[in-house]
Amino acid sequence: SSWKSSVCSYRIQRLNTSYCSNWNYSYYSYRRYSVMQMKMGLKMYKLNANDESDVELAAELLKQGKLVAFPTETVYGLGADATNSDAVACVYKAKGRPADNPLIVHIRSLQSLAQLSITPLPLSSLAETLARHFWPGPLTLVLPRSTDCVIALMAESARPTTVAVRVPSHPVAQMLLNAAGDQVPVAAPSANLSGRPSPTRAQHVINDFEGSESVAAVLDGDAFAPCEVGVESTVVDVTVTPPVILRPGAITAEMLHTATGIKFESVSSSTSSKHNSSGPSSSSHISNSIAESDAPRAPGMKYRHYAPSMPLKLAGSTRVSVLLKLQEELETIRQSDSKDSSRGVGLMCTEETCRWIAQELGVLQQLNVFDSSDLKCRTVWLSELEFVSFVYCGNDGNDTSVSKYLYLALRAFDEIETPTERVSVIIAQTVSEESSMKEAIMNRLWKAAGASSDISV
C-alpha cells in the first residue's frame, strides 16, 4: 500500500540528513539505523520474508539501486533494478562475473510485459503458449528485444537483439516483485560468487558475500518456502527455428514438446555429450557451434560453475560403480607420500547408496549415529588416518529430491569446520539414463567437475 511505501522511503531519505537517535528503544529508528548501515556498506542486512515491512524495505532498496538477494523456486537470486545500468554493473562486480555472461530479467506476471518496453507484442504463438503453460515457474524465455527496450544493455543476453525473461513462482519472489512494481523488473543471476555452487539457503548467500560492500541485504525466505527445484531455470530460445534449449532445468524437453507439439533441440556441452554413456546426443552439432562460442546466449553455457573448493570426480549411477571409485581414491591416498594432504574422501550420493556403501565398508553403525535429517557432512573414520565424509543428496528413484539438494550437498564439503576432517576429493554419484532430470543434474555435475572427469560405469 502507498503508506507502507512512504514509510520505507522515509526510512531511507531520513538518513541523508540525520543520525537516528534512541534507536535502542524505537523499532523504526532501529530500522533507520540498519538502513544507514546498508547505505554505508557496513554490513549486509538479513531481512525476514515473513515480515511485510521487510519485503517493502527490500523493494525500496532495489528502487534505490541497491543489490538484494532473494529466494526463487530454483535458487537464491542476486537482484538489481534491470533498468539501472549502475546497479546491473554492481551485480557483475559483486559476483566477479564475466562481463559476457548474460543475466535473466524477472517480472511478476505475463501481463507485466504490456507495462514494460522489453519485447515486441504480441508475443509469437510459441512464446505465448510456453508462457501460459509454464509461467510462473522455472522457465526462462529468450525473446526478441524491442527497439526501445528499457532493460540495461549489460543485463541482456550476448546478442543485443534478444532479452531473457522469466516469471518466478516462489511466493517471496512474487511478493518482492509486487512490492517493487512493474516498472522495476529485476535482473538476477544466482546469488553466489561466480563459479561457486548456487545458493539454496539464505546462509549460503551470507557465506559468500559477508563483508561485501556491494550487497545491501538478503531477504531470507527459508522459513516461508524452500527453493523447491534446487537448480536454475530451463532457458529456451524461441527466436530461432527450431527453438533451442540453451540450459536444461526442471522444465524438460518432453514437457515442452507436450505443451507445444514441437521438438526442441538441446544445447549441451561437447564434453557432456562425449561422456554421455548413451553416446553423443542428436544435437552435438549444435554444441560446437553455440555452447562453446565466444558469446554465450544464456547463463551457464560457457564457464565453469557450481564448483566446491576441492576437486569433484564423477562415478556412475550404480552403487557398485560408486564403491569402486571410492576404493580407487582411498588407494591413491594410501600411496601418497604427502604428510600434509587430507586423508579423507567426500562421498555425495543418495541416502540409500551412502548407507549401502557404509555397510560394505563395515561402518554403518558409525553412520547411524548421525541424525538422518542432518544435511551436513557425516564423517566416518575407517582407520586412525583415513575417513569418508558422507553427504546425502536426495533419495533413490526421486529425481526432484536429487536436484533440490544438489547444491546444498556440494556446499556441505566447504562448510566442514574441523580442519582434520576436510576432504581432498569428492566423489559424486550420477543419475541413470531413465532419470527425468538427467539433463539438468548432469549439466551441473559436469560443470562442477570442470568437465574433466571420466564416468565410471
Image (cartoon, grey):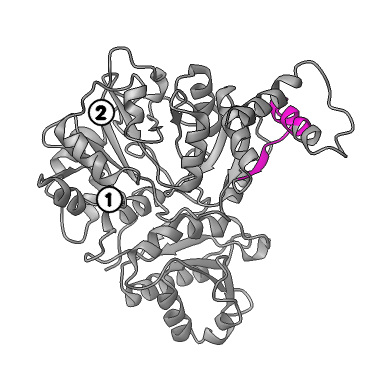
The disc placed on residue 143 is 2
Q: Calculate the distance from the C-alpha at mark 2 to the C-alpha at mark 1.
A: 17 Å
Span colored in magenta: 32-48
| Callout 1 amino acid | Ile
Label 2 element class = strand
In the image, taking residue 123 as reference, residue 372 lies left or right, namely right
**Relative horizontal placement of residue 88, taking residue 370 as reference (left or right):** left
Residue 78 position within the rendered picture, expressed as x and y whole percent measured from the top left: 51, 36
Q: Look at mark 1 in the image and give the residue it sits on.
A: 251
Tell which of 225 and 283 is nearer to you: 225
Residue visible at 20% across and 35% down in the picture: 127
92 relative position to 431: left or right: right
Q: Amino acid at mark 2?
A: Leu
Find out whether residue 108 is within the magenta segment. Answer: no
Q: Is residue 452 visible?
A: no
Q: Quadrant of the C terminus?
A: bottom left
Residue 322's image quarter? bottom left
Return the residue nearer the eye: 334 or 388. Answer: 388
Query: Image point 58% across, 48% down: which residue?
Result: 202
